Amino acid sequence: MRIDKFLWCVRYSKTRNQASIACKKGQVKVNDAVIKPSREVYIGDIIIFRKNQINYKIKVNDIPPNRVGAKLVDIYRTDLTPKSEFEAQELLKYSKDYYRKKGTGRPTKKDRRSIESYTGEEE
C-alpha cells in the first residue's frame, strides 16, 4: 500500500491529498529515509511524520484493506511516540497564552491583572 494511502487509512490525515503533500514536503520518513507519496509500506516499517508540531512515530502491524474506523486503528499500527513530544506541545500551548505581538499597544486591564497575578505583585 502507498504511504499516503496508509496514513489516510489509519486516520492520521483527513484526506489523501494532505498526506501526499506532507510526503512531498519531507515531513514523512520511513525507516529514517525521506520518501515520496508513492513509496510502498510493508509490515514492520517504522514511520516518522510531523503533524501539529509533534513528531509521531508508528510501526506498521498490518495493511488495512481500506479506511478503518477509529476503534480499529490500533490493529494496523503501534504508536511508538515518546511522551516527551506531547509534553513539549503542552509547554508550547502555555507559552502562546502569554505572548503578545509587538506593536499591539499597551496592555488591557485583563492583561495587567494576569501579569500581576503571574508575578505576584498585587496591590
Image (cartoon, helix red, strand yellow):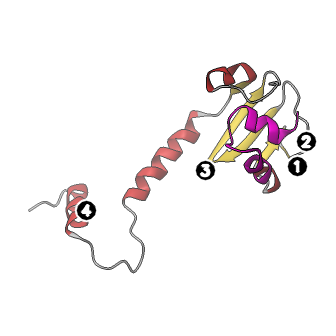
Q: Which residue is mark 1?
A: 36
Q: Which residue is mark 4?
A: 115
Disc 2 versus disc 3: distance between alpha carbons? Answer: 23 Å
Which one is closest to the eye, mark 2 or mark 3? 2
Disc 2 versus disc 4: distance between alpha carbons? Answer: 51 Å
Q: Position of residue 39 (x, y in %)?
A: 91, 42
Q: Which mark is residue 65?
A: none
**Residue drawn at x 43%, y 58% as measured from the top left:** 96
Q: Which residue is mark 2?
A: 39
Disc 1 versus disc 3: distance between alpha carbons? Answer: 21 Å
The answer to whether the residue labelled 2 contacts the one labelled 1, judged by CB atoms less than 8 Å apart, is: yes
Residue type pointed to by label 1: Lys
Indicate the quadrant where residue 65 lies.
top right
Residue type pointed to by label 4: Ile
The answer to whether the residue labelled 3 contacts the one labelled 4, judged by CB atoms less than 8 Å apart, is: no
Helix, strand or loop at disc 3?
A: loop
Say if the magenta span includes residue 19. Answer: yes
Of callouts 2 and 4, the N-terminal one: 2
Of callouts 1 and 3, the N-terminal one: 1
Helix, strand or loop at disc 4?
A: helix
Q: Which residue is mark 3?
A: 53
Of callouts 3 and 4, the N-terminal one: 3
- Magenta span main SS: helix
Q: Position of residue 123 (x, y in %)?
A: 8, 62
